[in-house]
Image: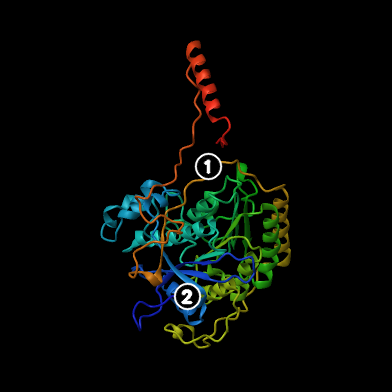
Amino acid sequence: MIRFHCKEAGEALGTNFILCCCSSSSSPNLEDLVLVDFDNWAMETGGHPMKPHRIRMTHALLAHYGLLQHMHVLKPNPAREKDLCRFHADDYVSFLKSITPETQQDQLRQLKRFNVGEDCPVFDGLYPFCQTYAGGSVGGSVKLNHGHCDIAINWAGGLHHAKKCEASGFCYVNDIVLAILELLKVHERVLYVDIDIHHGDGVEEAFYTTDRVMTVSFHKFGDYFPGTGDIRDIGYGKGKYYSLNVPLDDGIDDESYQSLFKPIMGKVMEVFRPGAVVLQCGADSLSGDRLGCFNLSIKGHAECVKYMRSFNVPLLLLGGGGYTIRNVARCWCYETGVALGIELDDKMPQHEYYEYFGPDYTLHVAASNMENKNSWHLLEDIRAKLLDYLSKLQHAPSVQFQERPPDADLQEVDDDQVGEDERWDPESDMDIDDQRPLPSRVKTEFLEPEAKDVGDNMKEDEHNREAEQAFSGSSCLKV
């Protein structure tokens, strides 16, 4: 077990971490969470509410609550251009790679085409930022695929609005879609669950016509960004009934939320039987969020993590929205404890961001007394409709056998050994070098033999008889 440590004495613990994994275990008490830390990218986004500082605060809480002593620290390589292009269009990725604050005025047409500039501002380090959080999510999927862990976590990921050819809602690259595509290399079916207050439109759109990925989104619906996610949107073609939307109104509380979440997700797990689950834990559905309008407590939000963990299916936990940053850090710290099976003390330990959590300095915050506009009649109607959709799925879809694509070669580095040892682990599941030969992706082709004359065929038959005699009396294995 490798503990996270600062590279220099007195240095503030961590900046932004990106990936953690729980080691494989049949026991419900999962141990050895793996945490990945990456350097903080200077994001000059002005007054934008999506602040990466919340990740640093989360990391500090994890460190001072002592959770890091149960964790390994890894640092994955950023996703490369070809990795991002497994979902995103080539020209869009090239644009993200080239755009800078200094050049954006010369590319106004491209900015409009790719929806970059307002909710998705241009800032220094934009492309490395995208590469890093996407690399963490894909790296977590690789670890899950190889059975190296039961749970992988990337609180810096979960950017669910990005589309194939455009940014949306501060989501430039859809790391969730890339992670699911990686999981599909091994698992026949993958389940995506979204508890962010916003509809997970980018992920739903990507898998709207397939029965190998089921998407379930619990979100505020109505006059609210992005405006999609009607309960009637259920998928198309082979994907019909494999997209589920749970439209909610303002002020929903823990009890009301769980009255939908548990029966719906329990039925989904029974009917769909996924090989892996991706859970997007956007914290803007918490009570008191700057941009949110739900009334969930941290324990109510984390109950979703606890419930999905109970199925003992490989689980990828991702971040997402969340704009009251002290509550975001509280929530993701507590949910990391839930993933580890460790109950955390409500009294917050002293740490470098301690003053953010005053005046109570506690891990949990009470829900407000805001009105719950979700009546029991409305909730029962939603639950009945979704369970009816699920009843139309007779069995989990099978997948025709085919050659498995190679793993994404995103090698992670043990942060404790950075600069100490340049060697790589021979048991690593990711390539260390672009020169390393990749598994062949070309299927063997069986060609019809060319026509031969009778004389040639007789000679070949005689040659075969001689070969059989030469091998008679010895043991042969035919391939």
Q: Residue at x 70, y 47 (%)?
A: 395
Q: Secondary structure at mark 1?
A: loop
Front residue of 268 and 409 = 409
1 and 2 marks in contact (CB < 8 Å): no
Q: Which residue is farthest top?
A: 454
Q: Position of residue 20 (x, y in %)?
A: 49, 67
* Residue closer to the observer: 441 or 278: 441
The colour mode here is rainbow
What is the CA distance from the residue labelled 1 to the residue labelled 2? 40 Å
- The correct choice, above or below, for 144 with respect to 414 in the image is above
Q: Residue furthest front?
A: 473
Residue 170 appears in view: no
Residue nearest the viewer, comparing 143 with 229: 143
User: In the picture, residue 52 is in which quadrant?
Assistant: bottom left
* Residue nearest the viewer, comparing 144 with 282: 144
| Residue 61 place in picture, x, y as percent | 48, 79
Q: Secondary structure at mark 2?
A: helix
Q: Which residue is at 35% across, 51% downward?
A: 434
Q: Please name the amino acid that badge 2 sits on.
A: Thr
Q: Work out whether 317 lies above or below 348.
A: above
Residue 119's spot in the image, x, y percent? Answer: 41, 61
Q: Of label 1 and label 2, which has the lower sequence position?
A: 2
Task: Identify residue for label 2.
Answer: 58
Instruction: Determine which of the numbered discs, if any, sits on residue 403 in the image.
Output: 1
State whether residue 398 appears in this view: yes
Q: Is residue 372 above or below residue 200?
A: below
